[in-house]
Structure formats: C-alpha cells, structure tokens
Amino acid sequence: MPETPEPALRVALPVPLPRLFDYRPPAGERAGADWIGCRVRVPFGRGEGEQVGVVVAVGPPEAPPDSLKPVLARLDTEALLTGELFESLRWAAGYYHAPLGEVLATALPGPLRGGQELPETARFGWRLTEAGLAAAKGPGREGKPRQLLLALAARALGEDLLDTQIPDWRAAARSLAQRGLAERVALAGRPEPAPVASAPELMRGQADALAAIREGQGFRALLLEGVTGSGKTEVYLQAIADALAAGRQALVLVPEIGLTPQALARFRSRLGVPVLAYHSGLADGERARAWTAMSRGEARVLVGTRSAVFCPLPEAGLIVVDEEHDASYKQQDGIRYHARDLALVRASKLGVPVILGSATPSLESLHNALQGRYRHLRLTQRAGRARPPAVRVLDVRKRPLVNGLSEELLAAVGACLARGEQALVFKNRRGYAPVLICHDCGWSAHCKRCDAAMTVHTGGRRLVCHHCGARATPPNACPDCASLALMPQGAGTERIEQALAERFPEARLVRVDRETTRRRDAIGKILEDFGEHSGILVGTQMLAKGHDLPRLTLVAVVGVDEGLFSADFRAGEKLAQLLIQVAGRAGRAELPGEVVLQTHHPEHPLLNTLLAGGYPAVAALQLAEREAAQFPPYAYLALLRAEAPTEGDMQAFLREARDEFSPREGLWLNGPMPAPMARRAGMARGQLLLGAGQRAPLHAALHDWLPRLQALKSARRVRWSLDVDPTDLY
Ligand code: ADP
Ligand code: ZN
Ligand code: ZN
C-alpha cells in the first residue's frame, strides 16, 4: 500500500504562470497549516535563481515528493496574509484571471514583496540638536529647511504630523541632519491627541446622508452623488469619526491628483488621529511602514490612491471611495484591477459599509444605484454660501480665433482680472500645438514609430510624440513639397499661455500641465504661490480638481470639441465628467462663478443636455445609448490585447486565439481588429473583444480560453494581456 506522501508547501510566486509551485519544508520541519500566508524564499528556475513567494496551501504534492526542492527560508513566523485580505486577493486573481502570485506581489509594498522583514512601526519624529537650536535663533536663508528648523524650534514633531504640516519635509530634514542641526528620534507613547477642529453643522442633505450611512449593519454600498462643493467630504469625515469612535479603522481612496497636503491636513485636523498617506510617490520603506501599521492595527486611518485598496484592515469599520468615477482607479498594466470594484468586494467580505462619492458618478455605479443594489444619496446644493456657477456657451463658428482663443473669451478673462479675481483657462492638451502641417500640400509631422501626429513644443522648436516620447527637430521645409510654409495647427496649453501673456502682459500667469509639474506636488507649490493673487491659470485636467481656489471665479473651457466626436464608447461620459469637474472650480467660496464654453458645436446634444439638465440628464442619455448598443453597464467586456514588432505575428496570434474560442450562448467575440492606435512605439497592435450579457458565462469562457492561449506557439512572439472590464478600448 502506498504511503500518503508528506504534504508539500504550495507556493504562489510572482511569475506569469497560472499555477502554484510545490516545495518541501526545510529538513526537520513539517508542512502544516501554520505556514499558510507566510512568505518563503525558494529556489526557482535554473542555476542560482530565487524567488520570494507566499504559501497559500499545504497539501499532497503534484509531483513525486522526492523531486521537490526545499524552501530556502521561511520569512514570516506568523502569517503575513490572512483572513479577508487573503480571500479578497484570491478573489481578484480569479476575477482578473491572473496568477495569484502576481496578484500577491501587486498587493504587497516593495520591501515586503522582496522578502524584507516587517518594518519597525514605532513612531518617529524629529528634533533639533544644540547646534540646530542655536541656528534657529540666528538669521538664515529662507526655504524649506529653514521652515522646518523653525517649526522644530519649539518642540520635537512626529513624522505623521510633519506629513500634514510641511509638504516635502523629508528632503529638508535630510539637509538639516547632514548639517548636524536636526536628528531623527523614536517617540515614546501614543501620538499627542491633536486638537480636533470643530465640525460645521450639517445641512439637511448631509444629515440625511449621514443618517443613511449610520442605519443598518454590515455591508452596504452607498452612492453619495453630490455636486462639487456640496459637502461630501464633510459627510465622509463624520462617518469616519463614527468608525473611530467604535474602535474601527477606515480606508479612504482618493484619485491620484486628490491626495494633496491640504486634503491630508483636513482629515488630520478633524479626526485628531494620525492619518497615514499611501501613494506611489512615497518611498518604498514608508509604504511598507504604513501597510504594516495598518495590519497591526496601530494606524487607524489610511488615505491613499489606487494601490491603497490592498492595505490590511483587520479592524475595518468603513471604506470611502472619493471621486469614484475617476480613471486613476483603474490599473492599466500588469494586473488590471479596478480599485473601486475591489473596494466593494473588500467591504462585502469585511461586512462594513462602503461609500462611493462623486459629483459625476460612473455609469456603472449609477446603474447599480438605479437597480437598487446601492443606496442612492444626493446632495444637490453647495455648502456654505457658494452658489452654482452660471454657464455660458460661446459659439465661435465663423469668428476669428487667434491662437485658439476668441475675442469674447479674452474679454471675459479681462473683466475677471479687472475685478481682481482669478481665471482658469482650461485646455486638455499640453504642448504648443497638436500638429505641424504644411500649408501648401497638407503634409503633417508624424511619429515614425506610432500612428500619431507629433505635438509641437517650445514655441515650435521641438516635436514630441506623446505616445512613445520620441523627439525630433522640426524640418525647415516640407519633406514632401519643399515648401517653407510649415505651421503649427491648433493650440495647446503652451500656446495659450503665450497668447494670454501677450494680451495681458501685467497679469500673473501660471501654466499647470505635465511639463510644468514634473516633480511630485509641484502643482501644490505652484498653486500655493499663486495663492489669492489675481491672475490666470492655464492648464490641463490636472487643474480639474484637488486644491481649493477660493478666488477663482471664471472658468473658460477651450476645445470642448475634440471630446464630442470620439469613437470611444465612454467618451461622452468622460467629457461630461470633465466639464462638470472643471466648471465646479468656479465660485467655490463667497464670490459668484462663471463658466464659458468655447465651441464650434453649440447644438451638440451632449452639450445641450448638460446645460439643460446637468450631469444626471447626460447620464440618463448615455445609459440609454449604452443599453441600446449593449455596452457596459448593460454588458460585460473583456479585451485581449496583443502587440508585436510585426503585424503578421500579432495577427497570427489573434487569429489562432479566435479559433481556440468555443462559441457559447449569450457571448460574442469581435475581431481580430487593429487597436484604435494600430502602431505605437514601433509595435503593431491589435485586439479581440469578448462581450456577454451576463458576467458568469463571460468568466466561465475566459477560464476555459486562457490556458489554451498560453499553450499557443504564436503567443511566444507577441506581448499579450487580458483586460477584464476594460475602461478604454485602447
Ligand atoms: P465636496 O467634498 O462635496 O466637494 P466639501 O466637503 O469639501 O465638499 O465642502 C465644500 C466646502 O463647504 C468646504 O469648504 C467645507 O468646509 C464647506 N462645508 C461643507 N459642509 C458644510 C456645512 N454643513 N456648513 C458649512 N460649510 C460646509
Ligand atoms: Zn508640403
Ligand atoms: Zn511615437
């Protein structure tokens, strides 16, 4: 009778293979349930190769026991991944059809993924040395280090407090430490309870929303739809305070651009506990510390961007997803998860409420609310004394545009400056002009490696491809007809800035786009300097949200038109959201706001609906269109993308992939078709789109299909990826 083999450790490794790998425990140890959730270092691949993985099961090995290699080291004595988080990650691996090991690697902060020990989570702070105290009394050069020096002169400050008080204080602290003026010290005891700023009395809608959140027990999803400035954040704050008072933790997800020191300071001052930030700009060690502090229950509130959805919440009380419609919640490479959707899954497994807030909810969430799956809460009025801005459409057909700007728009900006207020000129395109054309033959400058025009930069002295980063010097003469009449066509932020500078030479003028804000939080500094001065901001969607600008009273939108005729089925939804968000910047405080939209299509149904009925009307219109066309949220999609240096390889793979697909009732498969940008960075790109009226058959089909794709020979000559619930079809 064969003996039952010794159980093996079944390990998930961060490799693109959809399986687990079996190992033996080190000599003298036994594989038991206490290994599950622990990280191990294992030999992998040829030679000296090693990987760090997580033991996800203990069971009979698939291969003969003698062939198993032993793990090199067990890295955790207690499970790092347990309970709900572990379950949610397994769920994600199933839902996104991704190897569990890669999902686990995505979820863990870098140092933990790499096998490092859990970091020390004691609180650290900074204090001045004797030399520092002396320096603080004397004169010194203005700047961040000086600011920090003076802040520390009175007493040592915890790092969590510095995070909310002095943006970018870490560089300043390093500089002080190098000069022997300050030192890092472990702080004893609990954080000094910060004074809690008093909450305003809630308005009726806010009070109703809060009551609805407090009602009931366990998991429930609430969609808080509230116009910009209606006091949604105020509702989150009080709901979080409830959770804290009940001894629970809270997680707040914010869009990439919403995690400003201003926002953190508001949370901190109102909640009175340290509020940890979690985002891609943090040093690896900081991320690992925040993650660990949450997992130990030491930290109570975490505010973070997309990847914060993977933080442990052993004592969860509430999850908030602010601006739930925001595109930055969707990861666009690797494991293509959607943080809002994962937040819902986690809340449901945790048995806690999740609040989705937005002025412009995604059609998916609205649909769920209309179906009764989410409780729909509305805030229709701005808080305080702020009134909604007046919106005016500027029909610029047949009117002269100079550098893309109409005289009426310039006049509105001039009037705003004359009142001593601030204007925002919004153009969602950076650079000088979107294309360089030949006036005589129509030639235009294209990227050699992409199906795209090159953008003109630095006043016409440089061409840049926004898709692959290629750069070129513009030709002196047209390569096709030798004409010298080459001209930049259209206008980007750089050109608009220049035109405004010529027209308003006295005005303070600031441009905010990817070029002027390369450093993290550069935008914060720019807006801080801009402050309350009268002047003009020119910028892209980076200015659509984030920092409060109380003296901003005019929002002028240039170039609405590009978004009106896009082939992307989400274009209408995105444009309406963007317009509402930018418009919401005007008149957020006492001063009344005005919005002007400059367009060649004043009669376009989307604009008309938006003006007449606001976002709810546009959303209703778009939902009806989606239903008719069988697009999400009325259908479920998965997109198989492939790219290869040659079009032949790419197509061969997609054709074979199509052949491997077994047709099923209620499922459709479109393609192979070229991607909307058929060539990018020298790669030929194509796709297959799989759709279904129901989620379950779609996933069943993917489950069957993917192993067959992995087995295809042609798959080795392409880069391919699967995107479940794609947010764009590019
Ligand atoms: P949102 O998150 O919807 O954009 P906020 O919560 O940031 O709105 O509120 C907008 C502004 O109105 C903030 O300055 C906030 O302090 C203020 N505010 C919010 N609720 C109230 C209230 N009930 N009474 C007075 N002011 C309020
Ligand atoms: Zn020409
Ligand atoms: Zn390119």
Image (tube, rainbow, N blue to C red):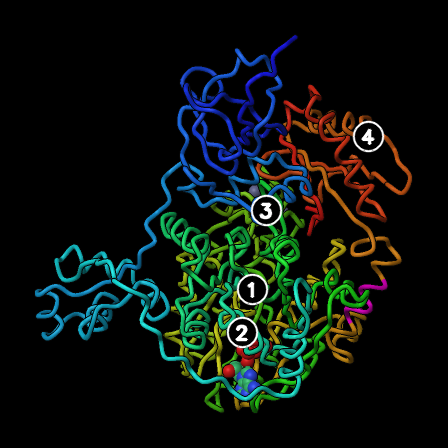
In depth, the one of 339 and 83 nearer the eye is 83
Q: Which residue is mark 4?
A: 661
Q: CA distance from mark 1 to mark 4?
A: 43 Å
Question: Which residue occupies 82% across, 68% down?
Answer: 621
Q: CA distance from mark 1 to mark 3?
A: 55 Å
Neighbourhood count class around disc 2 (C-alpha, 10 Å): few under 14, some 14–19, many 20 upward: some
Position of residue 48 relative to residue 329, above or below, is above
Q: Which residue is mark 1?
A: 317
N-terminal label among 1 and 4: 1
Residue 379 painted magenta: no
In depth, the one of 513 and 104 nearer the eye is 104
Instruction: Identify the secondary structure beneath mark 3.
Output: loop
Neighbourhood count class around disc 4 (C-alpha, 10 Å): few under 14, some 14–19, many 20 upward: some
Q: Which of the two marks, 1 or 4, is nearer to us in this view? A: 1
Q: How many marks?
A: 4
N-terminal label among 3 and 2: 2
Question: Which residue occupies 52% across, 42% down?
Answer: 106
Span colored in magenta: 618-624
Q: Main secondary structure of the magenta part?
A: helix
Residue 619 painted magenta: yes
Question: Which residue occupies 73% across, 57% down?
Answer: 570
Q: CA distance from mark 3 to mark 2?
A: 58 Å
Question: Residue lying furthest right in this view?
Answer: 665
